[in-house]
Amino acid sequence: MKKTLLFSVLALAMGNAQAGSLLPAGAADQQPVRLMAAPLPAGDFERQPVSMAWPMDPRAELAAPAPHRAESREYWTTVDGAELQAGLAIDTTAPGALVRLSPAGAVPGRRPAAAVDPSQLRVMRHGRLVAQPQALSQRATTAQLRQAGMEVSDGTAIVQLEPALGQGRFQLQLPRAEGQFLVHVFEPRSELVLAAQADRVRVLAGDSFEVSAVLGKGDRPMPGTRIEGQLVSPEGQVLPLAFRNGKALARLPENVQTGPGLWEVQLFAGAAAPDGAVQRDARTAIEVARPTARLAGDYGFDAASLAFRLPVQVAAPGRYELRGVLYATGPDGQLAPVAQAHSADWLEPGRRSLSLPFGPGNLPMGYGAPFELRQLELKDQSRMGTLETRERALSEGKPRRPLPVRDRLR
């Protein structure tokens, strides 16, 4: 009896410690091909290990975030005061366009632009001055905009062209305008939209990504559309984007600088329309990181504590984070998300490891093996970048048969 009990305990203990290999990376996963020893940013960093886990609703539907699709009915331009004095031409494609004018800052050797007084703004249509009461349906000063909760720079004014005037070309005059002004035109009623989207949410230095853009109604592009673009880093580094047939392939240099913040994808589109020119600007963002570490390709699993240990190959010292979602098999034999875990620790260069302890207390009644680890992410907290992602990282445990229907109802 004692011998049988001892054998069972030993067998259970040995069965709790298991090892395996990560599943191959999928097409949508991010996996560093090469690593770089990036310098550590200035500042103090936490060096103590930390981990946390919490249960999830098995009925929750989880999905990786899709790249943001930007849609624009607006554009920006910087103009000289002389243009506003003479009459700035604005082409609209729908009634009721909103125009925001702001002083663009001081220009060396010239007087700074004064605050915009919307009551002094004159509107011309077909070369004729439109009387003030019929020209603008709305007008607001800086004080009124801030009172409404908008964050605007000093001297900003917003006006709305009277919708009854229709669409087409207008001229805006500011008789005493001096200096430079930033003009923002927004057409909330227009059907002509510039839609732009990157094919990835994040990218590593040295890798490529694609940006697609279309100006038109829905997915029907306007004939003769011209699209230009650029990629701007948080530090102001600019990389041009060359569009052809509505697509641009951007390749990031391996030595690209990656400070805190997202990189901005800026697009500028134009086309000719029956009522005049169409202009649209759009912006979206992408996360850029230098590949300072990656998962080593295998893992260890402790069934008793529901903990995964994943080796990490580290090229640069820093604080690294691992996060993932545990899927377990329910009474119906289907996998469902049951817990989420995060852990972080300071890692020096070399072969290191991070653990994801989900804990048996976070496993719902009736759920167990086989398990899957999904939505796995390795992050460089010191440099604020995502290094590796796996939609399905690993599968652990043998399948079991679903309970009979009568047993599920007990």
Image (cartoon, rainbow, N blue to C red):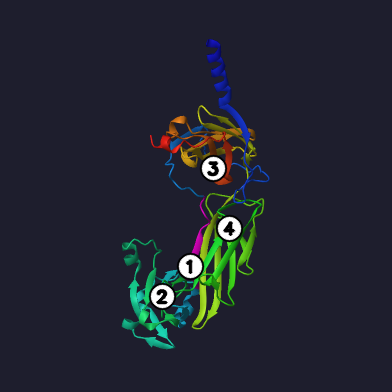
Q: Amino acid at mark 3?
A: Arg
- Is residue 167 visible to us here? yes
Sort mark 1 into few (<14), some (14-19) or many (20+) by Cα contacts within 10 Å. many
Q: Earlier in the sequence, mark 1 or mark 4?
A: 1
Q: Of tags 3 and 2, which is closer to the observer?
A: 3
The reply to whether callout 3 and callout 2 are in contact (CB within 8 Å) is no
Q: Amino acid at mark 4?
A: Asp
237 or 73, which is in the foreground? Answer: 73
For disc 2, the marked residue is 97
**How much space separates mark 2 and mark 4, taking CA atoms?**
32 Å
**How much space separates mark 1 and mark 2, taking CA atoms?**
13 Å
The reply to whether callout 3 and callout 1 are in contact (CB within 8 Å) is no
The reply to whether callout 3 and callout 4 are in contact (CB within 8 Å) is no
The reply to whether callout 1 and callout 4 are in contact (CB within 8 Å) is no
Q: Which dot marks residue 199?
A: 4
For disc 3, the marked residue is 374
Give the SS element for disc 4.
loop
**How much space separates mark 3 and mark 1, taking CA atoms?**
35 Å
Q: Amino acid at mark 2?
A: Ala
- Magenta residue span: 64-78
